[in-house]
Image (cartoon, rainbow, N blue to C red):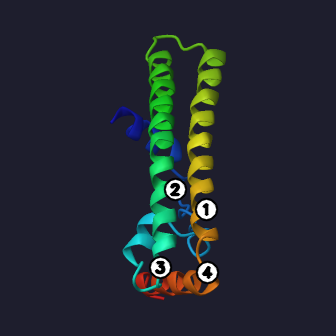
Amino acid sequence: MRTAVWMALLAVPLLGQQPPEDPMRDVMFPPEIVMHHQQAVGLSEEQRNYLKAELRQAQPRFTELQWTLQDEMDRLISILKRSKVDEKEAAAQLDKVLSAEREIKRAQFTLLIHIKNNLTAAQQSQLREIGEKARGK
């Protein structure tokens, strides 16, 4: 819980700014979207099996990365709780937190690429259309 609150504070945009639209929304396809619309896009049994295998392989990695992030965040929080914060120590620990986040994002990005590369151009187009309809475009 502390991590979520802290990360939300770090992610707060400057006053008056709107959060940017996700530029990858129309070019990458999260596994839950692909699986939810598997019949609509005609996912083959081979594609379904590939996706399941990718998810089974990714899940333990994501879990380990989340544990690492939590450990690094807990260390940062303990540094920040001190009555006098050593700026260099806090900055170094923040770098570790950001590095852990980067690894999570890289693993997610790699999974999304594997999923996309397993879809045909027609399936990708169908998923884009489904996404646009869901957003009311």
Check the image and report above or below for 80 versus 10.
Answer: above
Residue 23 can be seen, yes or no: no
Q: Where does residue 57 sit, x and y in percent of width and height? A: 50, 48
Q: Pick out the residue farthest to the front.
A: 46
Question: Alpha-carbon distance for marks 1 and 4?
Answer: 12 Å
**Contact (Cβ within 8 Å) of mark 2 with mark 1:** yes
Residue density around tag 3, few if under 14, some if 14–19, many if 20 or more, within 10 Å = some
Left or right: 46 in relation to 103: left
Question: Alpha-carbon distance for marks 4 and 2?
Answer: 17 Å
Label 1 sits on residue: 114
- Pick whichever of labels 2 and 3 is earlier in the sequence: 3
Image disc number at residue 43: 3
Q: Amino acid at mark 3?
A: Leu
Task: Tell me what residue is drawn at x 57 percent, y 56 percent.
Answer: 111
- Pick whichever of labels 1 and 4 is earlier in the sequence: 1
Residue density around tag 4, few if under 14, some if 14–19, many if 20 or more, within 10 Å = few
Task: Tell me what residue is drawn at x 63 percent, y 34 percent.
Answer: 99
